[in-house]
Amino acid sequence: MAGRTPLHQAAASTIIAILAVVVLAADQFTKHLAIQGLPPEEPVPVLGEFLIFYLVRNPGAAFSLGEGVTWIFTLALAAVAVIIVYLAIMRVRSRLWAVALGLLLGGVLGNLTDRVLRTPGFPVGHVVDFINTPWMMPAIYNVADIFIVSMMIAVALLVLVGIGFDGTRERRVEEPTDAERIDTGSADPADGTPERG
């Protein structure tokens, strides 16, 4: 079955840009609501122990690691964003890659916005986290984190199944062994092995 026609470069870039803006807006809006409506560092049960809102400002990475080197996370987020923008402009023509990278870019820009604009200021701003699901993990996270983690998994799966940026899928063709050639009657006469008639 023939695959879908690859996207035009402009269409792929547009998909990535639109999804990134949507995720960025959702992330920043929910953070604004959390800051306005939640008490700092006090658990607010929403669905019992399944979902708890707990507002914190995180200077580090996941599990508050690296609090003293926040600027490194800012640089890392900026580098990822630049790489995704480059791929969007130059390489991506696959719908799946466009969706995955667009959502990933939105998540990266959500946390990068915090690093750049929130207190204590550029480039060491603290990321606003407020979602806690203790049944799943002990971390407190945000909407941007959800998209970053899920889309990194999606990217890994796309690589694993061999889908390229242009939408083509790598096919691994294994050469048959000599025994298989003899059994199927397709041995190469040049190699001195007679074909079966």
Image: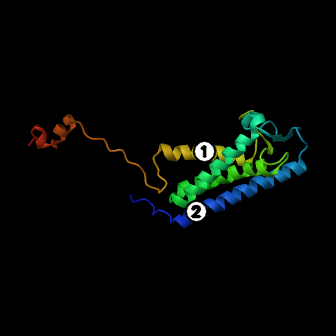
Question: Left or right: where does residue 83 sit relative to residue 40?
Answer: left
Q: Which residue is mark 2?
A: 13
Does residue 39 lie above or below 82 as drawn? above
Amino acid tagged 2? Ser
Question: Left or right: where does residue 77 sit relative to residue 90?
Answer: right
Does residue 93 lie above or below 107 as drawn? below
Check disc 1 and report its element: helix, strand or loop.
Answer: helix
Amino acid tagged 1? Met
Residue occupying the point 56% across, 47% down: 155
**Residue 72's x, y, as percent?**
71, 40
**Residue 80's x, y, as percent?**
63, 48
**Residue 123's x, y, as percent?**
77, 46
Check disc 2 and report its element: helix, strand or loop.
Answer: helix
Please tell me which residue lies in front, 91 or 42.
91
Q: Is residue 53 visible?
A: no
The image's mark for residue 152 is: 1
Answer yes or no: do the residues labelled 1 and 2 have beta carbons within 8 Å? no
Question: Left or right: where does residue 119 sit relative to residue 177?
Answer: right
Q: Quadrant of the C terminus?
A: top left
**Residue 44's x, y, as percent?**
87, 41
In this figure, which colouring scheme has been used for the structure?
A: rainbow
